[in-house]
Image: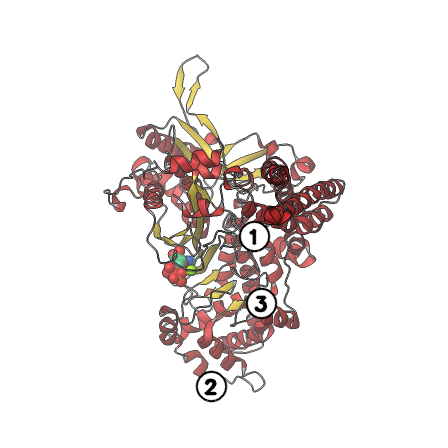
Amino acid sequence: MSLRFTALENLLHSKPVVPDTTTKITAIFAENVFTTQLARQFLSDEAYKSLLGSVKLGQKIDRDMASQIANGIRAWAEGKGVTHYTHWFQPLTGTTAEKHDSFFTIKSDGTPIEQFDGDALIQQEPDASSFPSGGLRATFEARGYTAWDPSSPAFIFDIGYGKTLCIPTIFVSYTGESLDYKAPLIKALESLNNAAVDVCNYFDRNVQQVTATLGWEQEYFVIDEGLFNGRPDLVMCGRTVFGHSSAKGQQLEDHYFGSIPERVYAFMRDFENEAYKLGIPLRTRHNEVAPAQFECAPIYEEVNLAVDHNTLLMDIMTRVATRHKLKVLFHEKPFAGINGNGKHNNWSMATDTGINLLAPGRTPKTNLMFLTFFVNTIKAVYDYADVLRASIASAPNDHRLGANEAPPAIISVFIGQYLTKILQEVKERVGDKFDETDESMLKMDIHKSIPELFLDNTDRNRTSPFAFTGNKFEFRAVGSSSNCANPMTVLNTIMAETLKQFKKDVDALIDKGDKKEIAIMHVIREYIVSSEKILFEGDGYSQEWQDEAARRGLPNVKTTPLALDAMVTEKAKHLFESNNIYTHAELEARHEIELEKYIKKVQIESRIMAELATSHILPAAIRYQNLLVKNIRGFKEVDFPESTYINQKQILEVISGHINKVSELVTKMIEARKVCNGITNTREKAIAYCNQVKDAFFDQIRYHVDKLELLVDDKEWYLPKYRELVFLR
Ligand code: ADP
Ligand code: MG
């Protein structure tokens, strides 16, 4: 019997695994995290101060202190039954990586002891040769090492067998090039901090630190593990390459408001508990638009921590799902014909004086500060729309962007009616001099109107890739399976760059004798004028917008290989170098890695398509074809007139047509792949894979296979069907 029928049979007996639903969240929250309270308890005053200085102000921790901190962390972890530790990092594969070592060691005199010293805390050398490095390691140095990131606290991973102490780290080569997603992110946040503090000081001298904040919303599908295993395409690529739409999809819109199915609810409670123990502040959960689709979101946090928490959560969800015999799909488009997954990145900046810089102010001064950061964001997105687009480019996200369910591949900014009006008013002052006595602009009562507008959801635009939502921007085009670090690195870097320019521009006017506020208003006005093309309030899914964007000259790059070009333009190189994020070599390496990832993903999909078509689809179709042939031969043998089996003949003809087409197209696709594999330039190879393999064959092959799915006898079809995958639990 095929896995499909076994899985369907097993579903009849499946029951939810009841999770612990009685414990209060506050009782378990962060119980597996080495929090600052624990640091207070386990560390000497000196070591505690040193750790805090590093967390809060990025100060360096010396070796001696590191050893003391390591001892404290080990004492805490051992008390919780931990025997192993690992440096936990986020290589460019897009997942997380770890290499476990035990505390156990043998001293020179042969005594076995448990030990975790400062060196082990600070640095570890994983066997890094098989992580992507885009040629960097080959060029510079053969080894990479992980280095402790004190700004993200150590935690104990306790899912499955054994408990492991995890030390969040960055991953770098011996010559200092970053080989992961986190090292550049931390640099970008530092750059933003410096630039934003300078600008804040125009308004408030007390601001010493600005932290970027991130609240992500993670979408995902949950399906039965047995059915998942019956789909080699899901197992290999995380998405179905074939599958006819089920009679019912999401057209009744009954899933979004429906109740959460029992088995999934049990799973959610279970992974939420695990997340709480690790200090991930999850707050919301709900059904999403597509059947079997859900979403969760935490309370926002400082970006670096939020990124760690997102990657950690994806790992937790994947592992906890197996307890429930479920599978989580984070792929951007697991099923054709119904919505895919996204990961909205809600982003803002906060000062150490407690002000959200993207929340409209309550006094004329904070009002102007808000307007400053708001307009600088718009300008940053306008100036670097292509770089921002590149930061979210991936093979799976190509299925979503521009597919009329997700923001288009055109980057635009939505700000709502009210702020549009405000910007218009500011702009109209261009021409006539903004005179010294005119302080009305500074007194705009922005804060009073905005919260109302946004709170009642009337001024929401779901089709914009970058939308202002009252006190933050929501970057909606981020892929659900991707690490938020990359888009966050770019967003914070372009913001830093723009703010630095802003400061220069304002200072230049002040030097010429303008009053500070007036100078600021002048520059804001100038920025509005120069970047307003990026503002769009209409329907981002419409053809009119595609046309309008083209007229405005906004970039609209639909495929990953071409979108990635923006990473290595002179503009991008200057941007990343001047903010100390990437050297040219690092940027080229990353470009290469992203292209290679793209090629491999399309290649794997193409292989699985060919394999499924040849060893699953065609045999099933041919078995059924034979049955029809036998049937028609039977009619002939008993001398029935042709009119009695004319319909059977027609079915046979249709099926034979599809069989021939699948067979022919698959052969051609394999040929096309061979041609692509012969191309040595990575960019050209990626473009060829996109055009000559993916675009030329995937949809066509799928069309005929999906037709066969509807025609062939159900019991001959071994791949679980869409209706089973998304409706049965
Ligand atoms: P919405 O209904 O607009 O999606 P929510 O209040 O539910 O708004 O927030 C969605 C996400 O945005 C949550 O993860 C939330 O924590 C996050 N968020 C709210 N304020 C901020 C902020 N200042 N910075 C970053 N993220 C934020
Ligand atoms: Mg949202």
- Quick one: SS at disc 3? helix
On the question of residue 353 being in view, the answer is: no
Q: Evaluate if marks 3 and 2 touch, with contact meaning CB atoms under 8 Å apart.
A: no
The nearer-to-camera label among 1 and 2 is 1
What is the number of the mark on residue 397?
1
Report which residue position mark 2 lands on.
437
Report which residue position mark 3 lands on.
504
Give the residue at x 69% y 56%. Answer: 569
Query: Which part of the image, by quadrant, shows the C terminus?
Result: top left
Q: Is residue 629 positioned above or below 220 on the image?
A: above
Q: Is residue 81 positioned above or below 575 on the image?
A: above
Tell me where residue 330 appears, x and y as whole percent.
Answer: 48, 46
Q: Is residue 408 positioned above or below 216 on the image?
A: below
Q: Say what amino acid the circle numbered 3 marks.
A: Lys
- Quick one: SS at disc 1? helix
Is the distance from the Cβ of mark 1 to the nearest ligand 2 atom less than 8 Å?
no
How crowded pointer 2 is (Cα within 10 Å; few <14, some 14-19, many 20+) is rated as: few
How crowded pointer 3 is (Cα within 10 Å; few <14, some 14-19, many 20+) is rated as: few
| Mark 1 or 2, nearer chain start | 1
